[in-house]
Image (cartoon, helix red, strand yellow):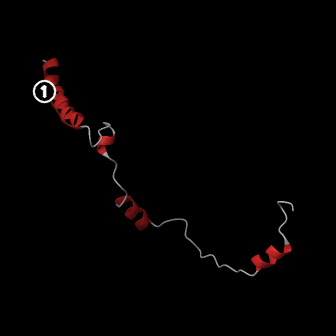
């Protein structure tokens, strides 16, 4: 049996089935696109800092380092 040829018995069985495929609109309307944009999941802000749930030291020290940098920046411009 060649891969391209289908046996007659199988072909007869396949011809018995008739399937109606419904028309599915491919282009979404503006309201659907807006709803999809509103309900899209938000990105994790801690992913940029690589903070996991168990890294409490990074979670504590990143804000402290940021505050120190913000307090000492004006000193360099005086």
**Position of residue 3 measured from the top left corner of the image (x, y, whole percent):** 82, 60
- Image quadrant where one finds the N terminus: bottom right
**Position of residue 24 measured from the top left corner of the image (x, y, whole percent):** 56, 71
Say which residue appears at 86% left-offset and 60% top-offset: 2
Tell me the SS state at disc 1. helix
Quarter of the image where one finds residue 15? bottom right
User: Against 37, is 12 above or below?
Assistant: below
User: Against 1, is 68 above or below?
Assistant: above
Judged left or right of residue 57, residue 38 is right
Query: Which of the two residues, 76 or 50, is positioned nearer the viewer here?
Result: 50
- Image quadrant where one finds the C terminus: top left
Total label count? 1
Q: Quickly name the residue at label 1.
A: 71
Quarter of the image where one finds residue 53? top left
Judged left or right of residue 17, residue 64 is left
Quarter of the image where one finds residue 39? bottom left
**Position of residue 65 measured from the top left corner of the image (x, y, whole percent):** 19, 29
Say which residue appears at 29% left-offset and 38% top-offset: 51
Query: Which of the two residues, 10 or 27, is positioned nearer the viewer here?
Result: 10
Judged left or right of residue 22, residue 28 is left
Callout 1: 10 Å neighbours few (<14), some, many (20+)?
few
**Position of residue 47 measured from the top left corner of the image (x, y, whole percent):** 33, 41
Say which residue appears at 42% left-offset and 66% top-offset: 32
Query: Which of the two residues, 15 or 8, is positioned nearer the viewer here?
Result: 8
């Amino acid at each position: 049996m060649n891969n391209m040829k289908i046996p007659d018995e199988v072909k007869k069985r396949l011809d018995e089935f008739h399937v109606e495929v419904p028309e599915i609109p491919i282009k979404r309307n503006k309201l659907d696109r807006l709803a999809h944009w509103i309900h899209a999941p938000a990105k994790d802000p801690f992913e940029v800092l690589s903070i996991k749930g168990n890294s409490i030291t990074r979670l504590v020290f990143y804000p402290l380092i940021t505050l120190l940098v913000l307090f000492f920046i004006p000193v360099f411009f005086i």
